[in-house]
Image: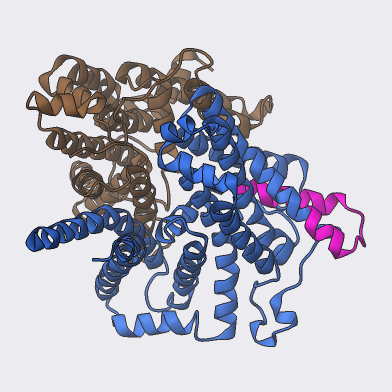
Amino acid sequence: MNARLRVVLEEAVLPPLVALAVAFVAGDLLILIYGQAPGAVWRALLEGTWGNAYGFGQVLYKATTLTCTGLAVAMSLRAGLFNIGAEGQLAAGGFGAAVAGLALPAGTPWVIAVPLCTLAACVAGGAVGAVPGVLRARFGAHEVIVTIMSNFIVLALLNYIVSAKLHVPETLHTPEMHAGQVARLSGVIAGFHGSAANWTLLIVAAACALAWWYLFRTRAGYELRAVGLQPDAAEYAGVRVGRTWRNALTLSGALAGLGGINFVLGYKGYYEDGFAGGAGFLGIAVALVGRNHPLGVLLAALFFATLSQGGLAINAMVPKQIVEVLQGIVIIAVATSVPEVRRVLRNAAGKLAGGRA
Amino acid sequence: MSLLLFLAQTLRIAIPYLFAAAGGALAERAGVVSLTLEGFMLGGAFGAVLGSHYTGSAWIGLVTGVAWGLMLALIHAVCSIRYKADQIVVGVAINLFTVGITRFFLQLAFESSSNSPRVAGFGGDAGSSAAAFLTNPLVWMGIVVMPALWWVVQKTTFGLRVRAVGEHPQAAASVGVPVNRVRYVAVLGSGALAALGGVYLALDQHQFTDSMTAGRGFIALAAVIFGRWDPLRAGLACLLFAAAETLQIQLQAAQLIPSQFVAMIPYVLTIVAVAGVVGRSTPPAALGRTTD
């Protein structure tokens, strides 16, 4: 088999397909346990997401956040590091954007306010990501442990600020921003009416393209990937590994933080405690299924957004939590089938080569 | 408040941490990453309530709770050991899966999205007398679990094998230790132990509530790391974290320190420990790696 084709098959195509098949079977079983017809439930799931403009708008909205957290995890994994802190970084980004929007005087034109708030989101998320980066580079502290712990610390800190210092009485959200809000898509496309889809998705799409350019077209991105593949060899070739780790985790945090603008600038106009709601952890799934490639991340984000919106569409027939189960199964199946598919294909290729000899 | 009450309250909070941290220490010493403790605990809590609800016996609830923990641990073990999947990814996925599956069956069995009905449990209700607390067998099991685990890990052949496959699996394999089998046993053991933490929570409160473990599995993981993967030190870390929480609850009226800052203590201490500012905390050498 053509070597390049085999790599594409074993890395990008087969594992997600295997996972999808496993998820379908598991989903069928759960639906049958609940006494419903699988065909009808799947149909309702598709109709409620891609079948009407409102549902599709919601999918786009959810996919926007997931693209950011997926890119964040992918960026760290490309450097050989695992950022599990996207949840806290996403929340920090949203908070940064909301505070920036509060600090700006009312009536600031959007061409100034939106970039400033976006920058604030990236800086806040990046600052949270820089901590494990620096601790890893300087002290060798394992980034998985530090990022897990940082989630709880950041979320507790934000909860304290929002519940004790900066909030609208009787709520757990900050006052509405004076400037920086972004319009919904429904202003232009009437069919999206009621959905939260908004123009920040263009900013996120641009970030996705930038991430691709950085990873595959710049020297820094090349070094980052080299460190991820083989840090000792990269160091020997003159790459400063510690600095690359620090930069990768900071960038990763900034990407996760960027996701905060979708909720804050595009939807509510304020920071609300708990808005991240697991999107950071789901970023791990998005990066994994998207095979750490920006284009793959985009597609995987759409897939997981479809599942999570689809849960609401089928809630009348089966509990919507069925999609959480399916998300878990998809992640497990992809993680498990990547090494397995690789092994099976390599064995098959080896047998073919052996047969010819 | 008397010192005795303070200690009892600390112990009550520490029991689930002690069970889960024991599970975490066992699996991680064998080289398998334990991000799954939260899921194992939640599964254990739900399994316990199912068993207790349908039979009326808390003891059967204990057994079914452990069975749920074993089931989830088996998924973790097969994916991570047999198929060499990334243990961190599988761990995160199992936690997500468990939240979903417990909610799904909560709906199916009890037609509720928030909690189960009241079931038979151990001991009295939360806040009841010390005597009722002391009749809870899980309290006694929780007190001895860490010393017992220490003895297993340090003094038995199995424990030696666990440490060997966690530090240097190739060397262990070369002297005939069945590396994967030891890891399977360790992961299944961690599932059973962590599940007991969840069983305790559910049977102490006499019901299951959605996501009732509320991050306790991660506090237990923090205790394992802060305790440098040693059962006795990890046990002390559990008690320390629980004492901080108790203090927080007692001082709530005084409002000296916001509760969020007390909640951060385990996580901050753990980061300080792995960064090695005072006495570096180093994981088992082969943690997270699978070998052929």
B8 lies left or right of B149 = right
* In-front residue for pair B225/A235: A235
Residue A93: within the magenta? yes
Looking at the image, the residue that sits furthest to the front is A357
Labels in figure, total: 0
Q: Viewed as shown, does residue B132 lie left or right of B7?
A: left
Q: Position of residue A104 (x, y in %)?
A: 88, 52
Quadrant in the picture for the C terminus of chain A: bottom left
Residue B65 percent coordinates (x, y): 24, 45
Is any part of residue B129 visible from this angle? no
Residue appearing at x 32%, y 43% in the figure: B87
Give the residue displayed 45% in from the left and 69% down from the top: A303
Provide residue A298's location: percent of width, then percent of height: 52, 66
Above or below, A170 against B221 in this view is below
State the residue in front, A175 or A253: A253
Rendered hue of chain B is: brown
Report if residue A13 is visible in the image.
yes
Q: Position of residue A254 (x, y in %)?
A: 64, 47
Q: Residue at x 10, y 26 (%)?
A: B174
Which residue: 39% across, 84% down? A43
> Of helix, strand and loop, which mostly describes the magenta segment?
helix
Relative vertical location of residue A59 with respect to residue B59 in this rendering, above or below:
below
Where residue A322 sits, quadrant-wise, is bottom left
B204 vs B149, left or right, is right
Q: Report the magenta residues as a range.
A: A89-116
* Chain A shade in the render: blue
